[in-house]
Image (cartoon, coloured by chain):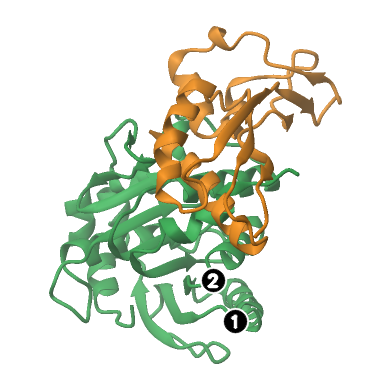
Chain colours: A green, B orange
Amino acid sequence: MKLDPRVNIIQTRLSKIKKIIAVSGFKGGVGKSSIACVLSLLLAKQGGASSLSTKKVGLMDLDLTGNCDNTILGIKTQYPEEEHGVQPVEENGIKFISSYFYSQGKATHFRGDEISNILLELFAITDWGELDYLILDMPPGLSDTALDIIRWIPQAEVLAISTPSILSRNLVAKSAKLLKEQKVEIIGFVENMSDGKARELDGLKILGSIPKDENFEQAIGDADKLLETNFAKALKQIDGF
Amino acid sequence: MHEWALADAVCKTAEDIAKDKNLIQVDEISVVLGQVQNIKPKVFDRIFEEVKLQYSSTKSTKLVTEIEEAELTCNNCGNIFGIDDRTGFEHQTSEDMHFIPETARLFIKCPKCKSVDFHITKGRGLYVKEIRGETK
């Protein structure tokens, strides 16, 4: 027998989380990490579009070979604490975990089965406690991470991100079709870097659009500045979470 | 302790198997601890004794642990190598590999070709080798 016990504890670790949202871009460079981070901040500090009450929010950077949420949010904590598992770091009102903490700033060149193992480890040992939302910042594509989330966390709902580009839209459309076939709930899609003409996308609900914000780059690393950007103001108008 | 979460996963697994296999209780669990993750058997045993009381099937379970030595296989040249001297790592590196064994790729190179592209083929982390108990 060679039995991996970590799979059996994942749902216990997530049992006090009301809603899990996987922010998925499918195509790289569409702004999913920026949206995942700022959405987490908005929910934690302002409650989002449909509520004025602040929420308990967790954010997990699952782009293991390209993690950057720590940079976007300006995370200063060096290492998560341990107490009955790993305690996510708490900054800017968000509980946050990332494999970044264990990489000493090095490039993270993981292969597929290693990615699955790391995800399993993080989900098995992270003690989130009670949360209103856990935001998963997904890597591009429908490879190991996406398939593992479908398998281990079927309650996760997908927030799809697209740009107006036909390349991005095509990929979102066919990825969403596959996810629906696999019974994955799709909240809808957000058009990022929008030209103001958000278009229908193969039966996916349009939640809203975010214009390109040339000043976003200057706010990276500062949560308060991020919330003042036009990017955040546009994202705050988007309802449906 | 991060070991607490893994001991919890082991006991939950034993509990699930006990229900599935109709066991009266789980008498013994054999757990293999991988050298790369470097969980100390004494530490894990102490935490297991605390965690096992939370599950009805494991309250009197005996834990048996064994260490599996690391075997790393280079994807570039096929060289198979081990981790000879754990104490040679910086404390932080040791901690990082303790939490996420796959980070070994960030800190170790194949001694033959210096590639950073290798697999942990043995001794990664913790797994359950055997669960024993009497059926009802």
Residue sitting farthest toward the left: A52
Q: Residue at x 56, y 43 (%)?
A: A118
Task: Report crowding for label 1: few under 14, some 14 to 19, many 20 or more residues within 10 A (C-alpha).
Answer: few
Q: Residue at x 33, y 48 (%)?
A: A96
Instruction: Look at the picture and state if A193 lies above or below A3.
Output: below
Tell me where residue A116 appears, x and y as whole percent.
Answer: 62, 49
Instruction: Look at the picture and state if B14 lies above or below B127.
Output: below
**Horizontal placement of A52 versus A34: left or right?**
left
Label 2 amino acid?
Pro
**Any mark on residue A28, and which?**
none
- Residues at marks 1 and 2 touching, judged by CB atoms closer than 8 Å: yes
Q: Secondary structure at mark 1?
A: loop
Tell me where residue A109 appears, x and y as whole percent.
Answer: 62, 37
Label 1 amino acid?
Lys
Mark pair 1, 2: CA separation? 8 Å
Q: Earlier in the sequence, mark 1 or mark 2?
A: 2
Residues at marks 1 and 2, common chain? yes
Q: Quadrant of the N terminus of chain A?
A: top right
**Which residue corresponds to mark 2?**
A154
Q: Residue at x 29, y 48 (%)?
A: A73
In this rendering, does residue A145 appear at all? no
Q: Quadrant of the C terminus of chain A?
A: bottom left
Chain of the residue displaying label 1: A
Question: Quadrant of the rendered structure where residue B136 is?
Answer: bottom right
**Which residue corresponds to mark 1?**
A183
Seen from the viewer's position, the closer of residues B1 and A131 is: B1
Tell me where residue A8 appears, x and y as whole percent.
Answer: 56, 56
